[in-house]
Image (spheres, grey):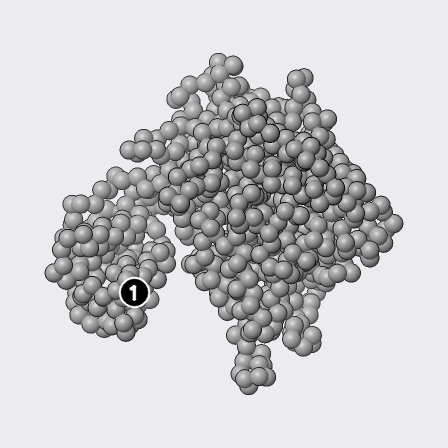
């Protein structure tokens, strides 16, 4: 196949940014050695090779390669990120979703920690149920001691994830699930009450039918010790549910999954019980099972008449199912157990993206009956065609090996190649590559501002909205800037009322419509739907409760909510942070008082004595200074720079514990052996020493050596007007933290944290 004859993908600048940062092959010096056309051809060639296993020759494989290439280069379909990154390369790990078992023994738990590291390194995310671990203070016969409980082991997994980089492309993400009848359920519900803990986990409570019966009847339900299987107590279902709801209202977690409903749809109950999902909750899996996902871009599924192009969707579904089934055969699984279980069930998850964009082009408001009805019609059509294609593949390639005894077999249905065919996943980065909206979410913002070089702020406008605004004569830079500040076109007199209604963004959609849309897609999705139900900051606990109950009543398999401004680490918000001096949009450091108090302590490092001064104002830790004895030159300059940046972060409202987390553990070639001074621990490097000194200070422990009170004058080198984040102003209402790559703000959508500045995504 001559690559020059292949159609060149038409990609946006943002898509190219994502591909350069995460997907293109690089040489040993880090230089890009791949174009978009070469990337899609690399993937297409590799995945098409699976056809040879089923008797296809060179001509057939080349034809399939061209078909797969056209599927991706036309932006009609994108596979999950590991497939784009790894197909045709040495790693060849192509799946995104994994679930690992956690059994109730120390060797098995730490074996799973090892397996988790292997999966994260290969680019996958992991889900776990901690429900089998005996509760805290339960008997451990082998040692005559007591168990520390599941929460303590979650912290072990979280710490392990923290230090694993996924091949330089993705960081690890985890899901932790605990059944509501576990004796430690209250501790689990509040496990993320402190936003500094378990940052590598999403957590969800697995609600059972018995629990829901108790909730609706006003009764109690039993708590069961997983070690013995014995009842060890009861709880009032309403009280536990209220506790879940209040915690979710506070900071967005835990989510909930309806575990018995999930298992009623488990296609292979004869093989095992589903206990957990992948990190974003859309893919329930058996222990040691994986799934590969892909998404159809609905934004391009329109014909010349301006209607949904059903024939095009049918063609794309059929090719996509073929593609995803081939991925299973071409996958280099990280563990033999995962290879065995995945090949036995051959689950695939075909979903969609670009839903909001399709509605824009059809002139249908997201929050409307018409949109909900179309959602059911489209997903029903996709599932029907996917099942039909999977059955055609089964006629040629055979059904999935666990077909006998499966629900399909019990119901007397024809053989099928894949135990599941549909999943609606978050599409954080692949939707950017496709140039479309994410998953089934409403558009986050029509217009927003992004910082570029030299702190210029570039206004980015949604392409179709810009086209409509220009053709209707109301486009102007001034109006676009105003929309970026407001986050919505609702109430803008210069925008026609019809367009105000059509161009609905996430801020305009009520939680009830979020759930109704999720349920509409869930009705025709084998697995589950990744979606975030967004609440305004002033939403009440009862509002959250209403949506959780609505999710159950409408047939959803789980739900995740996020209330704007509810996480302490939020760096931008629609809420004015008066006490820190931060207003909407641009973060400005707190002004420095003329007099300020603090402490100074000494740490012995491998490079000499390091003196650290930490000052505070009335809101807490304010700034720090570090000086490496009498040493000058590069080392002293770097330490001073590090201290200035740490001070700037604290003055700008960043949680000081996040600074500690970033600095602790950095190691230099010449560590100081043995605990000394302010840290009471071995000092691995100067940054490590600064981090440990700050942590000790925050925990209220005075330095043991060289302590003195300081009164520091104002310093003129702080740039009070320095911009440290994207200016997205009030359009950024679901911000949940700081991007680990570019330092800008991340939003929460599709059950996943995404950066709209550098396009980093935690999940896909």
Q: Position of residue 471 (x, y in %)?
A: 52, 14
The residue lying at 60 percent from left, 29 percent from top is 1
| Residue 39 against residue 195 in the figure, above or below | above
Q: Nearer the viewer, residue 127 or 419?
A: 419
Secondary structure under badge 1? loop
Q: Quadrant of the C terminus?
A: top right
Q: Position of residue 428 (x, y in %)?
A: 53, 41
Image-based side of 496 in relation to 273, left or right:
left
Image-based side of 599 in relation to 417, left or right:
left
The residue lying at 69 percent from left, 67 percent from top is 221
Image-based side of 65 in relation to 681, left or right:
right
**Mark 1 Cα within 10 Å, few/some/many (few <14, many 20+)?**
many
Q: Position of residue 699 (x, y in %)?
A: 33, 66
Q: Which residue is mark 1?
A: 684
Q: Nearer the viewer, residue 100 or 28?
A: 28
Q: Mark yes or no: residue 508 visible.
A: no
Q: Mark yes or no: residue 260 visible.
A: yes
């Amino acid at each position: 196949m001559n690559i020059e004859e292949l159609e060149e993908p038409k990609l946006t600048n943002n898509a190219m940014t994502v591909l350069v940062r995460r997907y293109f092959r690089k040489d040993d010096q880090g230089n890009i050695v791949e174009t978009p056309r070469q990337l899609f051809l690399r993937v297409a060639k590799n995945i098409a090779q699976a056809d040879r296993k089923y008797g296809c020759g060179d001509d057939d494989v080349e034809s399939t390669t061209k078909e797969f290439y056209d599927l991706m280069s036309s932006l009609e379909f994108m596979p999950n990120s590991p497939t784009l990154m790894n197909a045709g390369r040495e790693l060849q790990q192509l799946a995104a979703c994994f679930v690992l078992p956690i059994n109730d023994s120390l060797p098995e738990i730490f074996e799973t920690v090892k397996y988790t590291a292997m999966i994260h390194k290969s680019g996958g995310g992991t889900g776990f149920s901690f429900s089998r671990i005996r509760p805290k203070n339960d008997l451990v016969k082998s040692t005559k001691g007591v168990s520390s409980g599941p929460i303590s082991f979650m912290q072990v997994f979280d710490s392990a994830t923290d230090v694993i980089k996924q091949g330089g492309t993705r960081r690890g993400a985890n899901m932790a699930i605990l059944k509501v009848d576990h004796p430690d359920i209250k501790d689990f519900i509040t496990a993320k009450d402190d936003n500094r803990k378990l940052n590598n986990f999403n957590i969800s409570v697995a609600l059972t039918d018995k629990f829901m019966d108790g909730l609706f009847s006003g009764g109690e339900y039993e708590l069961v010790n997983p070690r013995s299987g014995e009842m060890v107590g009861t709880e009032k279902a309403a009280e536990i549910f209220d506790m879940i709801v209040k915690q979710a209202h506070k900071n967005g977690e835990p989510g909930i999954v309806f575990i018995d409903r999930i298992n009623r749809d488990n296609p292979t109950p004869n093989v095992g019980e589903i206990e957990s999902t992948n990190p974003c909750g859309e893919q329930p899996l058996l222990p040691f099972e994986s799934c590969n996902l892909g998404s159809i871009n609905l934004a391009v599924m329109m014909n010349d008449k301006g209607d949904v192009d059903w024939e095009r969707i049918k063609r794309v579904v059929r090719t996509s199912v073929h593609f995803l089934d081939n991925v299973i055969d071409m996958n280099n699984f990280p563990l033999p157990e995962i290879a065995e279980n995945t090949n036995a069930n051959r689950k695939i998850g075909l979903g969609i993206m670009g839903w909001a964009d399709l509605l824009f082009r059809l002139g249908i408001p997201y929050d409307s009956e018409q949109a909900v009805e179309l959602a059911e019609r489209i997903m029903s059509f996709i599932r029907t065609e996917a099942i039909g294609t999977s059955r055609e593949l089964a006629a040629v390639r055979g059904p999935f090996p666990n077909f006998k005894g499966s629900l399909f077999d019990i119901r007397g249905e024809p053989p099928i190649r894949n135990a599941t065919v549909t999943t609606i996943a978050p599409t954080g980065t692949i939707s950017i590559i496709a140039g479309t909206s994410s998953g089934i979410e409403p558009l986050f913002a029509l217009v927003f501002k992004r910082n570029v070089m030299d702190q210029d702020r570039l206004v980015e406008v949604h392409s179709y909205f810009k086209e409509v605004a220009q053709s209707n004569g109301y486009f102007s830079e001034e109006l676009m800037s105003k929309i970026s500040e407001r986050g919505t076109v609702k109430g803008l007199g210069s925008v026609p009322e019809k367009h105000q209604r059509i161009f609905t963004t996430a801020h305009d959609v009520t939680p009830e419509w979020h759930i109704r849309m999720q349920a509409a897609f869930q009705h025709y999705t084998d697995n589950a739907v990744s979606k975030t139900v967004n609440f305004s900051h002033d939403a009440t606990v009862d509002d959250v409760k209403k949506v959780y109950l609505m999710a159950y009543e409408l047939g959803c398999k789980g739900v995740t909510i996020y209330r704007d401004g509810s996480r302490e680490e939020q760096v931008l918000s629609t809420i004015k942070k008066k006490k820190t001096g931060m207003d909407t949009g641009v973060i400005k450091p707190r002004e420095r008082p003329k007099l300020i108090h603090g402490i100074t302590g000494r740490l012995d490092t491998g490079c000499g004595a390091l003196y650290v001064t930490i000052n505070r104002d009335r809101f807490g830790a304010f700034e720090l200074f570090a000086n490496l004895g009498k040493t000058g030159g590069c080392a002293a300059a770097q330490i001073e720079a590090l201290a200035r940046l740490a001070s700037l972060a604290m003055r700008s409202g960043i949680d000081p514990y996040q600074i500690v987390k970033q600095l602790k553990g950095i190691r230099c070639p010449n560590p100081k052996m043995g605990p000394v001074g302010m840290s009471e621990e071995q000092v691995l490097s100067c940054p490590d020493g600064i981090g440990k000194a700050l942590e000790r200070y925050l925990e209220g422990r005075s330095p043991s050596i060289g302590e003195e009170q300081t009164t520091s004058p104002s310093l003129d080198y702080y740039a009070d007007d320095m911009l440290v984040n994207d200016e997205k102003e009030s359009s950024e209402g679901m911000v949940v933290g700081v991007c680990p790559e570019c330092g800008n703000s991340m939003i929460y959508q599709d059950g996943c944290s995404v950066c709209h500045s550098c396009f980093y995504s935690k999940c896909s």
